[in-house]
Image (spheres, helix red, strand yellow):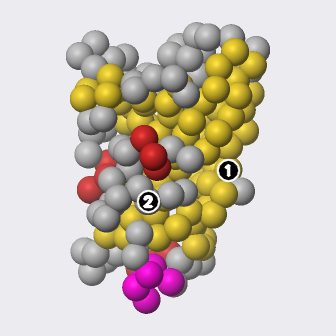
Amino acid sequence: MDQLRPFSSDPNSAAFNVFGDLDFRKGELRIRYRILGPIDELVLPMPVENPQFREELWNATCLEIFLQQADSTAYEEWNFSPSGNWAYFHFQDYRQASGGALRLQPLTPLQIIRNDHQLLLQVDIPLYQTWTHIDQALHYGLTAILQKKSGEKLYWAMHHGADKPDFHLAQSFVGRHHLRQ
């Protein structure tokens, strides 16, 4: 598992540890997130009966992944809420949304386990619909936004590439994987 780092080293961030793990399978990617700490201090949206695409999930606790082909400026963003809702976005370049992006959905519903000291979230996402090359290098960045009940947001990433939290920066996509089919 990759350990994500908080953007700031304040005492509120020190109470938590955030991890992400990827398992590349043929045509899909399994992502597992684990948050350790005082979970009851976080704003966690209530689970919904019929999870679906929702924008602005990052306004509350949200787990994310950014995926980019090594030789491209285009990238994908997936957001996952503890409610079970998700979002998918495609960008042609830094924060330039594609006009005709598909509203993809995860292959399986989000699996969420929560207790007082940890939150686990697992999801499988499709790669075959957008990553059609058989042999390609892939860069990725795992990120998390933890919103505390006080309203404060804590930003976590594998790497922070700027002087303020900005998960869309290509230099933040420090994970590497070579897709083969």
Secondary structure mostly seen in magenta is: helix
Q: Amino acid at mark 2?
A: His
Placement of the C terminus among the 4 image quadrants: top right
162 in magenta: no
- 172 with respect to 24 (left or right): left
- 68 with respect to 79 (left or right): right
Place of residue 96 in the rendered image (x, y in percent of width and height, measured from the top left): 24, 29
Residue at image x 68%, y 11%? 134
To which residue does mark 1 refer? 21
- 35 with respect to 1 (left or right): left
Place of residue 47 in the rendered image (x, y in percent of width and height, measured from the top left): 43, 52
Q: Which region is colored magenta?
A: 9-14
Q: Residues within 10 Å of mark 2 (few under 14, many from 20)?
A: many
**CA gap, disc 2 and disc 1:** 18 Å
12 in magenta: yes
Element under disc 1: strand
To which residue does mark 2 refer? 160
Foreground residue among 138 and 119: 138
State which tag comes first along the sequence, 2 or 1: 1
Element under disc 2: loop
Which of the numbered marks, if any, corresponds to residue 62?
A: none
Q: Amino acid at mark 1?
A: Asp
Circles 2 and 1 in contact, beta carbons < 8 Å:
no
